[in-house]
Image (tube, rainbow, N blue to C red):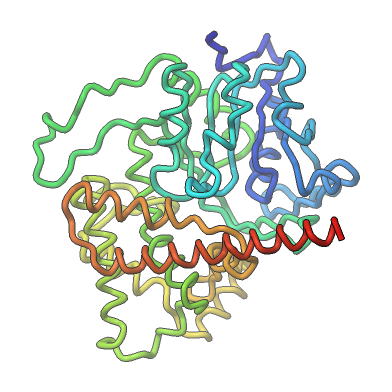
Amino acid sequence: MTVPVSNTNGDAPVDILLIGLGSIGSVYAYILEKTGKARVTAVARSNYDLYTKGGVTLSTERFGTHLGWKPYRIVKSQSEAFADDTHYAFCLVTTKCLPDVNPTPKLLADAIASGKVGAWALIQNGLGIEEDLYQAVKHLSTPIISSLAWIGIMTNPDGSVVNWRGQDTLASGIYPPLPCVPAGQDAAVGAGDRVFSKREKEALELWVGILRDGGANVKVTDHVDATRFSKNIWNCAWSSIQGLVRTRPASWYDIDPWITQPMRDFMREIVDVGFEAGLLKEGMIQYPGGDLMGSRESVAEACWTRTPRRPAEIEQIIEMSHARRNAGGGHKMSLWVDVEMGRPIEVEVIVGAVVRLAKQIGVKTPLLDYTYALMKGLQVEILEQQEAKREAAKKTLTA
């Protein structure tokens, strides 16, 4: 059965199913619903009572403060969302991508089996986050819209207040994208026969149109994998460092360069993989600023120099921008927070995907390989601690 991308009749809103009612999910659900062109059914588990009883406070610089906000409908499970005749134009996923813990096809098993989803929309960090889902649904020809966000959002400890400061940029594209040409390969040879279908184009047009009408700053790309790699340079480099040593980049500002050279070499390995794979090229647009990418040397140097800053600089940036999450060397990245909270980390899509790509194209990355091994050990420790807590909770209940 082919589910239409849009279930609209005239001016009726499209239905969108949201998996991941956290800070990112809440903000984009608000934007999607803002003009009345969409209504969001959100699957909530741990925060079900929070959203159903009183809603949350959305505090934004762009759209003001909204008390008691909640999406159109809140359900406890995907099966509940599919219990009626509702067909969803999109199933939007804003959870962390954890293929080694909860693969996307497993996470979306009910949605995939329902036959009631017209297209998939993913807003997630990392590289190759779409592939598992693509393999699971490609026989259905269901479009996949892949997006990545640059947005400064913080949530208070109990999740009741979502703070959004500054602007937003969302880059969206169809997956699989048009192919990139690896370094040293003829463009004609690497072009392949990928052509976006009418259904895929319609899904992307609907997705972008609703978001832009809601005020989102959406950029469209035919090479979403390249855009993902461009963003993932910083995540792969600094999220892994912060997660492993729990230290802000500013700590390295005054250390002698010969001591920090291995860190720079590590970042250069990441950049080299992108250039050799054809995902990074001089002159390509870099978001969110829209500046053009320079040489691989300049990109690697920027990854290092734009992040470590003196503490005084950090405080000045925070004071001027009111956006602590974007404050350069003072920024505590989400992977570090996940480690502190004992939550699984996105090691596979942030670091592991780059390692596997390097091996596929024959680029040696000893420092990156070493970092990946350390992070895999950290992931195992986190998962073992989670399991120990679950077992302890079970014993408490049966005691």
Estimate the x, y position of residue 180 in percent, counting from the top left. 24, 38
Estimate the x, y position of residue 381 in percent, counting from the top left. 53, 66
Q: Quadrant of residue 51?
A: top right
Specify whether 164 is left or right of 130.
right
Answer above or below: position of 59 versus 226.
below
Task: Give the quarter of the figure containing the N terminus.
Answer: top right
Specify whether 278 is left or right of 226.
left
Looking at the rendered structure, the number of numbered marks drawn on it comes to 0
The residue lying toward the viewer, choosing from 78 and 89, is: 78
Answer above or below: position of 309 versus 398.
below
Quick one: which residue is furthest to the front in this view? 399
The residue lying toward the viewer, choosing from 265 and 309, is: 265
Estimate the x, y position of residue 391 in percent, counting from the top left. 71, 59
The residue lying toward the viewer, choosing from 378 and 280, is: 378
Q: Quadrant of residue 92?
A: top right
Q: Residue at x 54, y 28 (%)?
A: 207
Q: Quadrant of residue 185?
A: top left
Q: Residue at x 27, y 49 (%)?
A: 357
Task: Give the quarter of the figure containing the C terminus.
Answer: bottom right
Estimate the x, y position of residue 266 in percent, counting from the top left. 29, 70
Specify whether 351 is left or right of 211.
left
Q: Residue at x 80, y 40 (%)?
A: 70
Answer above or below: position of 30 versus 353.
above
